[in-house]
Image (tube, rainbow, N blue to C red):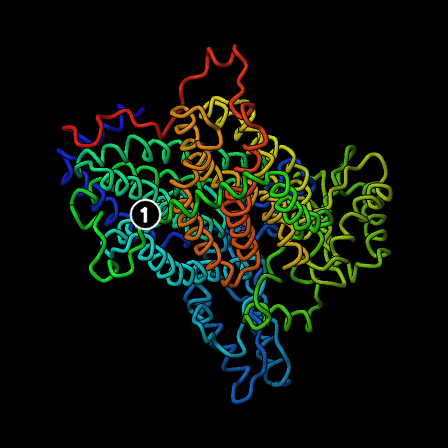
Amino acid sequence: MQGFMVRLDGMLRRRRWWVLGAWVVALAVAVPFAAKQSDHLTGGGYGVPGSQSQTVEEAIDADYEAAGRAPLAAVLVPKEGASLRRDLETVRRAVRAEPRVAIRRDVLRRARAAAEAEPRRTLVVPLAVAEKEQDAIDITGSLRERLGLAEEEGRPGVHLVGQTALWSRMQEVAKEDVEKAERSGFPIVALILLVVFGSLAAASLPLALGFVSVVVTGGLIYALSRTMEMSVFVTNMASMIGIGVAVDYSLFVLARYREEIRAGRGPDQARAAALATSGVAVLFSGVTVALSLAGLFLIDTTALRSMAIGAILVVGVAMLASATLLPVLISLLGKRAWARGRFFSRFRMRQGRGDAFWARWTTRVMKRPVLSIVAASAVLLALAAQALDMQTTNGALRQLDPSDETRKGFEAAADVSGPGASSPVKVLANFDNGSVRSDDNRAVLADIRSALRRDRAVARVTQTTPGDNGRSALVLAELETDGEAEAAKDAVYRLRETLPRAAGESVTVSVGGTTAQQEDFRDTVSGSMWKILLFVLGLSYLVLLVLLRSAVLPLKAVVMNLLSVGAAYGVLKLAFGEVDAITPPLVLAVVFGLSMDYEVFLLSRIRERYNATGDTRRAVAEGLSTSARTITSAALIMVGVFMTFVLTGLPSIQQIGLGSAVAIAVDATIVRLVLVPAAMELLGKWNWWLPAPLARVLPDGNLEELRLPAAGARA
């Protein structure tokens, strides 16, 4: 692999303008599409194949055309200085301009009469949408723009409600959050890079790669969203991970390049050496991150899988950019890529002084390994213990700020129509014998409706519709609470027990609706966590087994990664109480993947020094001292990027950002700087134990041991 990277560097040196031109073209093509990447993202993808809620939705799509259409309504709230009739006319004009939405004449007539008779009363005006719920988010977004609701100040007193309106607003908020995070994240990253490199030119290289990776991935997400269902949170995931990994990968390569320059190599040879060592490690780490994220495919839901796709795409683009674009940019910058700027030269700290500090630190830790392990583990276990009773939740409405106009619209509509009107329970009855209109089956439907009315959470049974197939019926019921309340969730589980008993053995009863779908999703995610855990644990162990040629060190790394994730979960529990259902699997996959970066760079350096000296203590000290500064800087950047997303509006994204930031911070400090050296001191020669049969078949996976001519030789 090192030979391939050296040959790649030679090709890049000869064809650098072609390579740069290709990336400029890719960026130019991606920019307009990246700007629209959220246009076709949806709030769907939370259906669980085989679940009752999915069975109901599939039946609605097949046999209940009217019931499958997107529920949407305009809510007009009286405001000082405003007129209900004027607002109603505004809604009418906006609807007329949108051909896929309409207001029935009788509905409009009654609304006008109500606005005239009671001008201080909130009006809920049902709108007819000609598309199914999952296909109507774009329509709702267009209508929101026509009404001015997508603008920051909105239109006082006018709101749109319904599941499509909710997810359309979530789409807008997610886009706004990404823009805010990127605006604040890049300056933070730039400041850290300036401190690390002491050069504006050198600091601009990782920033450029971060920008290119995020934009190109945005274009790819737009293309994919036209052909498959992708979650509104894909852009947040791609941006969050993309900025971090692109900057980290370029930081590792650029730091090694500058290190080789200081060792006496010429620019061309130093660049080849950087690609042959850290460049290979970047590719190795990137593939591992992608594979770790692929563990999310073990959860059979489109939403999580689409988020995994977005993250994997941005990691792939970042890997490609670090292997091709970065060497070209380094070559074009020349001396500016490794020399410190005139201003920063005044504050330069000698590299040897920094290495000496880390060497002293490692020595102190390794002199008291038991104390170090006990103290560090106690802190992590104390945090992890907080997560033992961590509860997950699911939903969208409560993620919006209480002051958000869409949330206000839902609350106003609930005051008029009841809190459960926007998310009815959908009960599907499939009859084994006879038509739905037979006397026996009509009696069964009556029993189902009666059982619904008897449930303490049901406010009213609103509708019973025979299916087009003649052998099923759909019963709708409104709850006393909104669909995201605990009482609504309890009602779903209770109805799934009581309704089949009321219907009898010849009828299959399925309970669906928004609340049921959310609970089925939450149960599926919780029930699949063990599969993701086994996948990432096994993957991490196998990768490090091949890389380090040790059966012990990978086991130690896996245990320490678990401590990092556990500590992150504990902090999330303390900060949020309940966490979103998507948070635990995403944090697990992201953290295990990203922690491999630091694992690979640190332990490969330690192994390189052990191969040269045969002394574990010296190898750890030298490996840590040469990599700690870079790893700490990379982790600081990653934490800074994740924390910018903590400041955004959606709690689910805040939780992913905070959990990942805590885990990376713990991993790069307590784990890498305390637990790793202390554990390796205790294990001694056992660190490098490998059964003979494995030793014969495993390849030499050392990534940092340089196999190039010595410094000063001709490249």
Would you say 623 lies left or right of 433 here?
Answer: left
Relative to 407, is 664 above or below?
Answer: above
Type of amino acid under label 1: Gln
Residue 277 position in % (x across, y down): 32, 32
Specify whether 98 is left or right of 657: left
Identify which residue, 658 or 473, lies in the foreground.
658
Residue shown at the point (57%, 42%) measured from the top left? 588
Residue toward you, 295 or 379: 379
Q: Quadrant of the N terminus?
A: top left
Q: Is residue 491 or residue 370 the one in the foreground?
A: 370
Q: Position of residue 220 (x, y in %)?
A: 35, 44
Residue identified by numbered label 1: 351
The reply, left or right, for residue 698 in relation to residue 270 is: right
Q: Residue at x 51, y 52 (%)?
A: 661
Percent position (x, y) of residue 339? 21, 50
Q: In the structure shown, which secondary structural element does the residue marked by tag 1 occupy?
A: helix
In the image, residue 654 lies at what x, y percent? 54, 57
Give me the residue at 26% from left, 43% from top. 258
Q: Up-down: is 576 above or below 687?
A: below
> Can residue 284 be seen here?
yes
Up/down of 291 relative to 415, above or below: above
Q: Is residue 290 visible?
A: no
| Residue at left offset 44%, top offset 23% | 614
Q: Nearer the viewer, residue 445 or 524?
A: 524
Residue 240 in the figure: left or right of residue 382: left
